[in-house]
């Protein structure tokens, strides 16, 4: 008898638990923010400087993302993090500018040599 009562108790527990889970409100309905590693974080002023450098280099004609990244890194130099993080940071800023509509893109932006960006007309 004890096995049947244990089984019944377990079934009841899982039934109640599944109903409770359905009633929990889902607070996180907004799209997930992209997580940028701490080594790549900069102040808001630096983000603005990076955005301005990107926009000053891009033109109304299509340019490879790899070339834009290299020119921005050359222009800003030591203000950016060390190593590959500097290139990844500029690439993330380009993706953000595209999402905000300040740049147009064609191709997969994660493939820098196979995608292009330009300013809207």
Image: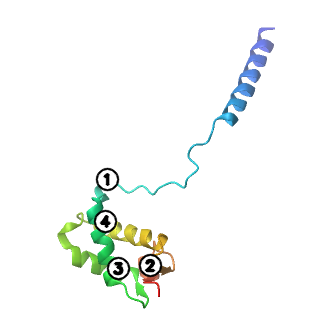
Residue 39: x and y in percent read 29, 56
Q: Which mark is residue 103?
A: 2
Please tell me which residue is depicted at 63% across the width and 38% down the height of the picture.
25
Q: Distance between the residues labelled 4 and 3?
A: 12 Å
Q: In this view, does 107 lie to the left or right of 26?
A: left
Q: Where is mark 4, residue-wise? A: 47
Q: Residue 72 carries which label?
A: none
Residue 85: x and y in percent read 30, 64
Q: Which mark is residue 55?
A: 3
Q: Is residue 61 left or right of residue 77?
A: right
Q: Distance between the residues labelled 4 and 1?
A: 14 Å
Of pointers 3 and 1, the one earlier in the residue sequence: 1
Of pointers 4 and 1, the one earlier in the residue sequence: 1
Q: How far apart are marks 3 and 2 (CA)?
A: 8 Å
Please state which of the two labelled residues, at mark 4 or mark 1, is closer to the viewer. 4
- Mark 3 and mark 2 in contact? Answer it, CB < 8 Å: yes
Which quadrant of the figure has residue 4?
top right
Which quadrant of the figure has residue 42?
bottom left
Residue 86: x and y in percent read 28, 67
Q: How far apart are marks 4 and 2 (CA)?
A: 16 Å
Of pointers 3 and 2, the one earlier in the residue sequence: 3
Q: What element carries label 1?
A: helix
Q: Where is mark 1, residue-wise? A: 38
Q: In this view, does 74 lie to the left or right of 27?
A: left
């Amino acid at each position: 008898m004890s096995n049947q009562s244990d089984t019944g108790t377990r079934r009841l527990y899982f039934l109640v638990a599944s109903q409770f889970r359905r009633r929990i409100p889902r607070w996180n309905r907004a799209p997930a923010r992209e997580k940028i590693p701490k080594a790549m974080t900069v102040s808001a002023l630096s983000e603005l400087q990076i955005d301005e450098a990107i926009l000053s280099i891009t033109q109304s004609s299509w340019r490879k993302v790899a070339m834009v990244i290299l020119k921005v890194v050359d222009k800003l130099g030591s203000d950016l993090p060390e190593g590959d993080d500097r290139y990844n940071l500029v690439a993330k800023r380009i993706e953000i500018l595209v999402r905000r509509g300040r740049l147009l893109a064609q191709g997969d932006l994660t493939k820098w040599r196979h995608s292009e960006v330009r300013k809207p007309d």
